[in-house]
Amino acid sequence: MPAIPTTSVANLRDLGGLPLGDGRAVRPGLVLRSAQLDRLDPAEPLVAGLGVRTVVDLRTDSERGERPDRLPAGARLLVADVLADHLATSGLPPAARLKVLLSDPALAEEHLGGGRVRTAFTRTYRTFVSGDAARAAYRSLLTELGTPGAGPLLFHCSAGKDRTGWAATVVLTLLGADAETVRSEYLAVNPAVRQAFAPMIEGFTAQGGDPDLALQLIGVLPEYLDAALDEVEFRHGSMEKYVRDGLGVPDEVTDLLRERLTADGPV
């Protein structure tokens, strides 16, 4: 199972062990994903045992300023802001406003009701593929993963579901995972995210808020991922071409990434 049950890092998952076909799997312990690391305890045994050497932070300036990462011992930080040129026009609330919206059902309905939250998320997922900041951020991530001799890498955003979910989708697809495996990993974060936001959701619904609206906002839906995949198909035709032409990652880096992160046989 890719989930790692730490107490100081939410939604921490190891992509290692996921099947890639032909008897191959993702090599364990080298590529991890999570929510923000503002409460990370470097001394927690499960955290220390990961030996993370690089943390890639996909969050915005404001998110990093409000909840700065606490890094694992010996790790370096790489900032790769996916939404630097998009968040202000996305229609999505800044992370700081999420708590406010989920405490006021009328306000949430005003700003995000009537399907607007789904529209905003699908628009943002398309920007993961086409936006200048997003392309630079995901290029940086893949370049780090394709660096010879690099140690374990952890990438994250705030909740570890959207920006992080697309990053995991790109990596797994490049490694040869089938569509079912990719989608399963994308959706697998929902229980952890709903648990993390459970008090907010319960309070929201207790005040008469629409539970579906809350879940559309704090969870991930198949249609969000489909929007990004459709954007890849429309603009580039395949994930390989998106990575090569859209992100500007050379084939030799992709080859090294596959070599590093792929294991033969059960792991």
Image: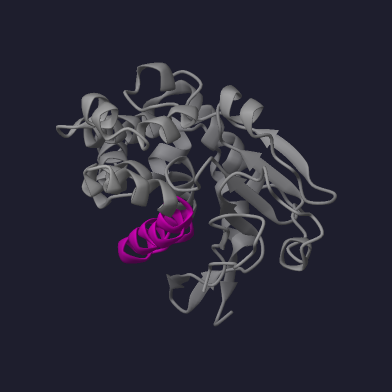
Residue extending furthest toward the front? 207
**In front of the other: 122 or 11:** 11
Residue 86 in view of the camera = no
Would you say residue 183 sits in the magenta stretch? yes
Residue beneath the point at 36% across and 47% down: 203
Rendering quarter of residue 76: top right
Q: Nearer the viewer, residue 13 or 255?
A: 13
Colour basis = one colour
The residue that appears at 54% across and 67% down in the rendered structure is 3
Query: Is residue 168 visible to us here?
Result: yes
Q: Is residue 252 left or right of residue 196?
A: right
Q: Position of residue 225 (x, y in %)?
A: 31, 46
Q: Quadrant of residue 191?
A: bottom left
Above or below, comparing residue 217 to residue 73 in the picture: above
Most extreme residue toward the bottom, as rendered?
266
Residue lying at 23% horizontally and 37% vertically, measured from the top left:
118
Residue farthest along the left direction in this orientation: 114
Is residue 87 covered in magenta? no
Residue 217: give x, y in percent of width and height.
33, 41
What span is in magenta?
172-197
Q: Looking at the picture, how far across and down is residue 54, in whole percent? A: 73, 46
Q: Image quadrant for the C terminus?
A: bottom right
Picture layout, residue 74 above or below residue 92: below
Please name the predominant secondary structure of the magenta segment in the image: helix
Point out residue 44 in the picture as x, y percentages from the top left corner.
Answer: 77, 62
Left or right: 51 in relation to 61: right
